[in-house]
Amino acid sequence: MRRVTTSKESPATRRTVLCGAALAALGLTAAACGGGGSGGSGASEGPDEPVDLGDAKAVPVGGAKLYAEQKVLVSQPEEGDFKGFSAVCTHQGSLLGEVDGDVAVCPMHGSRFHVDTGEVAKGPATQALPSVPVKVRGGKLIAGPES
């Protein structure tokens, strides 16, 4: 039996295949870099409701702790003075990876943020981390709105 086609199909040219591959690669690169793409427009500002972060003693005085699952960074510059920030990089929306001394580091492109202020210590990020309210209740840290 002979195959009959009703539309005029043309085989893919080398140029068509290469253009498609290039566009696919660009899409994958954008997705791998956080997907937000427009200077952190997709960055989260922290939890939408209060979340229990656990024992307040887990955050060292003069240091900070990253709560990756809750996307919150909490520092304690002075005893009893807790500061909270979104743990989502303002560059392209990646989750911060670690606290290194007095800065939090984004593993994607190396942006660094001061843990006590959320301000950019080193780019490519240009915007500070949004603050997140943090309170101590019964010895536990509670982060988020109405905390």
Image: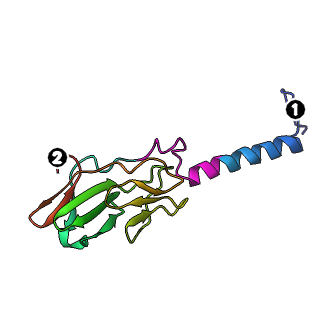
Q: Is residue 62 magenta?
A: no
Q: Quadrant of the N terminus?
A: top right
Identify the residue shown where x is 63% and y is 51%.
28
User: Horizontal and vertical percent for residue 68?
Assistant: 36, 63
Residue at label 1?
A: 4
The structure's colour scheme is: rainbow
Query: Which residues are drawn in magenta?
Result: 27-43
117 with respect to 105 (left or right)? left
Q: Is residue 14 above or below residue 105?
A: above
- Residue 15, position in %: x, y? 86, 42
Q: Nearer the viewer, mark 1 or mark 2?
A: 2
Amino acid type, label 2: Glu
Q: Residue at x 33, y 56 (%)?
A: 117
Q: Identify which residue, 69 or 57, lies in the foreground.
A: 57
Above or below, 119 against 55 in this view is above
- Residue 73, percent across and down? 32, 60
Residue at image location 83% in from the left, 27% down from the top: 7
| Residue at horizontal 40 percent and vertical 49 percent from the top | 128
**33 versus 4 height, above or below:** below
Q: Secondary structure at mark 2?
A: loop
> Is residue 127 left or right of 70 when viewed as pictured?
right
Image quarter of residue 78: bottom left
Instruction: Tell me which label, 1 or 2, sits earlier in the chain.
Output: 1
Q: How many marks?
A: 2
Specify the quadrant of the image occupied by residue 72: bottom left
Query: Which residue matches tag 2?
Result: 146
Q: Secondary structure at mark 1?
A: loop
Viewer-proximal residue among 64 and 92: 64
Question: Gap between marks 1 and 2, in whole Å?
Answer: 68 Å
Q: Is residue 31 magenta?
A: yes
Q: Residues within 10 Å of mark 1 (few under 14, many from 20)?
A: few
